[in-house]
Image (cartoon, rainbow, N blue to C red):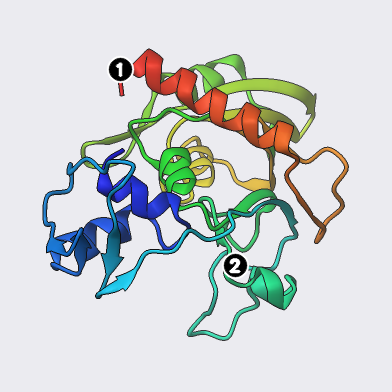
Amino acid sequence: MRINKYIASSGLCSRRKADELIEAGRVRVNGEVVRLLGYEIRTKDKVSIDNKPLRTMKLEYYRFYKPTGYITTSSDEKGRKTIYDILPDEMLHLNPVGRLDKDSSGLLILTNDGNLVYELTHPSIKVAKVYRVTVDAFLKVEDLEKLAGGIELEKGKVAYCDCEIIERKKDETLLEITLYQGMNRQIRRMIEYLGHNVVHLKRIRHATIDLTGLKKGQYKPLKPKQIKELKAYLDKIKEKEGI
């Protein structure tokens, strides 16, 4: 296993943070400083960070139904409420996989498994995130085609999505949108490009994990079967993409 993945899998930090530790010369293998991100760890190798043995933490996995009105960070300079104002003290060390903005609700996966966070959020691994989105307009098929075809939200960055109409009224449309990207406020910006606004946005599924059985503000640990299915899903994507 590569050393950055090995460190992230211990639960100490994310894979990106592990890269920073390695590049800073703070990681040793069998007493020797290692700066090569692709260094392969063997079973008997002893890894240390800042001369302290790397200890494997108990990996924890939860699903959480984020209500609107909360931001997905541990603290905020503006004094806004965060998801950690809802979560109990024993879960404050867990990291959210991706984000939902203040006005959005729905599923967040929370974990201290840095490698899982990396694989669920890295742009090269096309993980499906499914949303129910209410738009303040009667959308036409041509609108959906524009969303699927791609919209350049930033120079050189094209946003796209799979989109299905669930219900339409005179001045409102309920959509099911699937993203495989992670651009900031992507859905809201894409709908604004069409000249409309998002009224409600809720994430209902991330990879194989969904909201079934959860109420707003509620959290539940993932069952071993759910964790196994999630990791198998990621392995299948990586194999398909040749990662």
**Relative image position of residue 204 (x, y in whole percent):** 71, 38
Residue that carries the numbered disc 2 in the rendered image:
71
Q: Quadrant of residue 88?
A: bottom right
Disc number for residue 242: 1
Residue 23, percent from left and from top = 14, 61
Residue at the spot 54% in from the left edge and 58% down from the top edge: 112
Q: Earlier in the sequence, mark 2 or mark 1?
A: 2
Lateral position of residue 135 relative to residue 35, left or right: right
Quarter of the figure with residue 111: bottom right
Q: Residue 44: percent from the left, percent from the top?
A: 31, 46
Q: CA distance from mark 2 to mark 1?
A: 35 Å
220 relative position to 198: left or right:
right
Q: Is residue 38 above or below residue 141?
A: below
Question: 37 or 49, which is in the foreground?
Answer: 49
The 10 Å Cα crowd at callout 2, few under 14, some 14 to 19, many 20 or more, is: many
Question: What secondary structure is marked by label 2?
Answer: loop
Give SS at disc 1. loop
- Residue type (three-letter) at the residue carrying disc 1: Gly
Q: Is residue 52 above or below residue 175?
A: below
Q: Is residue 69 left or right of residue 32?
A: right
Quarter where residue 231 is shown? top right
Q: Is residue 207 visible?
A: no
Residue at 70% x, 77% y is 89
Residue found at x 52% / y 84%: 78
Q: Nearer the viewer, residue 97 or 133?
A: 97
Residue 24's spot in the image, x, y percent?
14, 68
Residue type beneath disc 2? Ile
Q: Is residue 17 above or below residue 147?
A: below
Camera-side residue of 154 and 206: 206
Of all residues, the one furthest to the front in this rendering is: 44
